[in-house]
Image (spheres, helix red, strand yellow):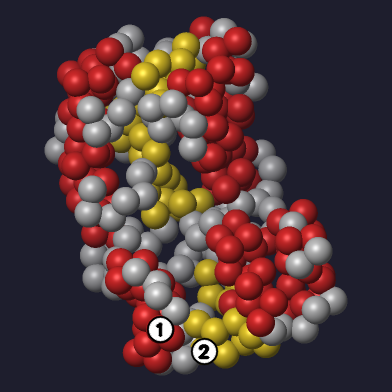
Amino acid sequence: MRIAIASASGRLARSTAEYLLEKVSPDDVVLVTRNTDALAGFADGGVAVRYGDYDRPESLPAAFEGVDRLLLVSLHELGRRVAQHRNAIDAAAAAGVRHIVYTSYIMADPADPGCPSTVVPDHLRTHELLDASGLEVTYLRLGLFAETPVTQILPPAIERGMLVDNTDHAKGAFVHRDDCAAVAAAVLASTGHEGRTYDVTGPELLGFDDLTALAAKITGRPVGYLSVPDDELDAQLRAAGVPDDVRGMIVSFGTALRAGYGEPLTDTVRRLTGRPARPISDLMERHRDLLAGS
């Protein structure tokens, strides 16, 4: 069984590769990336590192040659990534890949396509492409990355003394990116996951009001929480110069969270890796200096 990880220089893919190499021989692993120099350390360890670019579909068949199972890590650019995913899926099928593991999103449910989050339609379209590909597929519907609030949202909010959003105390099961990587590696290295969908979440449901309280406790710096209507948040973001697509993504995330789309809570991490999912407070402790502004 030869296993490939696409977009392998990204943070999730790179962590997955590290976990995977604890389970299988380097000879069985292929890392596909646009930036092969970034993975020189893996190549030095005996892993095949190949050039492949979703935007250059002619580069992909050779990148996937001899591969049996592929981790297709979803890309981030709205409006472009469906075409990029299509290129990867078509090339994988042409190269003889039998099984694709796709990193989807907790809010992307083909049985409930009404989620208002603007990031969901691209995932649902990718599901359609994969389902029509004739390949075996496993969907990893990843939860809300804990790194986003801890490293991006909370530090400026703590500096201002207030976190403002439109989530109205709605909750989500924030999950460490590293736990998602461990799950992906476990699926790639074993059998019996074909046709399965796994929701990968953290161990507890928390709202952004809970996160500000945790951050204040860990840093000793007070930070308040205020939820405002969608149009008011949109106006604030517009005044701050946030681009239209990013502003829409932020506002629609809060709308989706209020509608309950972030609430699945599962034990997938424990079941597939043998260890429990880590709480977001662990990540806050690791980034205490960043949160404290020191």
At x 74% / y 57%, what residue is drawn? 287
Which structural element holds mark 1? helix
Residue at the extreme left: 132
Residue beneath label 2, please? 227
Q: Relative to residue 14, is residue 254 drawn left or right?
A: left
**x and y percentages locating residue 130 in the rendered image:** 22, 39
Q: Which residue type does callout 2 highlight?
A: Ser
For the point 40% across and 75% down, the residue is 241
Q: Is residue 202 visible?
A: no
Asked if one can make out residue 12 in the rendered structure from this viewpoint, the answer is yes
- Give the left or right position of residue 56, taking residue 16 as reference: left
* Rendered view: 54 above or below 227: above
What residue is at 49 percent from the left and 57 percent from the top? 143
Nearest to the observer: residue 239 or residue 219:
239
Q: CA distance from mark 1 to mark 2?
A: 18 Å
The residue most toward the right is 220
Residue wearing tag 1: 239
Q: Secondary structure at mark 2?
A: strand
User: How many numbered marks does the figure carry?
Assistant: 2
The picture places residue 159, in percent across and down from the top left corner, at 69, 77
x, y (%) of residue 274?
66, 39
Please, what is the three-letter code of the amino acid marked with disc 1?
Ala
